[in-house]
Amino acid sequence: MAKDFTVAIVGGGMCGLACTVGLSKSGIHVDVFEAGSKFEEVGAGVGLGPNALRALKGLGLYEAVLSRSDTPSPTFRQFLFLSGLGEHEVIYDYPRTADDLGLGIYRPVFFDAVVGLLDPSTVHFNKRCVSLTTTETTIAITFADGTTHEADLVIGADGIRSVARNFVVVDAMQKHVTFTNTVAYRGLIPLEDLEAAGLQMQLSTRPIALVGLNKHFVIYPIHGDKRINVVVFMSKRDIPPQPPLPSPWVTAASDGELQDQFQEWGRDARIIVDHMKASSKWSIHALNPPLASYCRGRVVLVGDAAHGMPPHLGAGAGQGFEDVFVLCELLKNDKVTKSNLEVPVTRVVQDALQAYTEVRAPRANWVLERTIEAGQIYESYQPGRETQEVTKLSNLWDPIWHHDLGVDVNRAVEMVSKHVRVS
């Protein structure tokens, strides 16, 4: 049966599209509004841990995404931590367990897999949201072109510079977005080019982190292990987080911009830097402090709009997919209808969104804070401090990867069930 309420999703990134498909499969009418002229996302590879893959399975997207990737099945995602200096000695080999399977995927592959599942009539391009307002019975979205759209509830999937967040966070003095004083250089390098240059490091089988003082690399294979996704981080950790930088936050890196920064690092690190051609330079921002709530009334946030975090644990996309899965499970529940006779119109929908935020905010905010700490751990390494480093690096991912989403969904549904019954 079709649901009796409508949903508008602001933002057509990975989380916005996953949510669109998940809700549409449940008989919920969804319109998605994307600011650009097509679906695309800046960046290269994205790592999906076991928790992210379970969420995609719950949304019915896993097989479609996997079928478009160059990897026939997920692989083990445990990081090998190496010194960025000298001969790149092993610092810590993250232990592997049987269910620690993840996937490194090129972002356009995700879009190729998901776009085909959308109803084209519900997709709207060149619609940049500028404000949200509450009407007597709906939420109205105003776009930069002067048009408006009304829906029973709005999902803000519009990233870390979210306009929907401006509606949710009532106190204008609360400035959550900060510049972390970290820049990241992202690039894709053919593995054969690195091997031809004499690289000794084995990069085709698992993720690797090269760590050092105020700098680190994150490296993992994508495209069937033929290309290597590289992210090089450099930070200024002697100053506190700053207000957001002016746009743009992503620019093209100039030739040779990185080489001078890594002359003291090991040979393989310098080879990788030398092959970072046509890389992009990202100014890393985060929501710090985290949001106390992800919803207000009938507007709710998912993904980076709710808990934008640095990429140091590769957990941001996974937390977004967890958001989407929990929210879709709640909204498709038979108790969540606009016409339920036990409560005022739309009140049950608001209760569902409140249950979502009570379940998701503590979890995702904890991952956000853990991610910030991870960056500090990577970039505090100095030779001779291996023992301390191992203690800090152990168990970084286990609580993220092995979280039981089913328990979260059941708890959220129970919260809503206390207030309503099926009419």
Image (cartoon, rainbow, N blue to C red):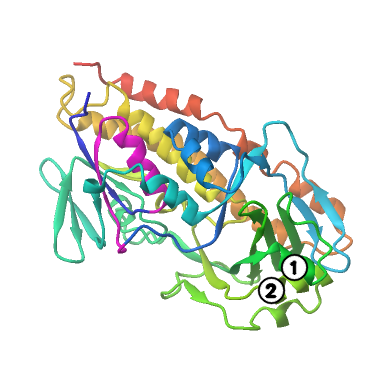
From the viewer's perspective, tell me whether residue 357 is left or right of residue 198. left
From the viewer's perspective, tell me whether residue 382 is left or right of residue 42. right
- What residue sits 26% from the left and 26% below the top? 336
**x and y percent of residue 184 in the render?**
59, 68
State the mark number for residue 194.
Answer: 1
| Mark 1 vs 2: CB contact within 8 A | yes
Task: Tell me, yes or no, whether the highlighted magenta stretch contains residue 415.
Answer: no
Q: Nearer the viewer, residue 54 or 413?
A: 54
- What residue sits 65% from the left and 73% below the top? 276
- Callout 2: 10 Å neighbours few (<14), some, many (20+)? some
Q: Residue furthest left?
A: 136
Three-letter code, disc 2: His
From the viewer's perspective, tell me whether residue 331 is left or right of residue 260. left
**x and y percent of residue 120 in the render?**
25, 48
Judged from the image, the secondary structure of the residue bearing numbered disc 1 is helix
**Which quadrant holds the N terminus?**
top left
Q: Tell me where the magenta segment starts and ends, as one range.
A: 13-37
Three-letter code, disc 1: Leu
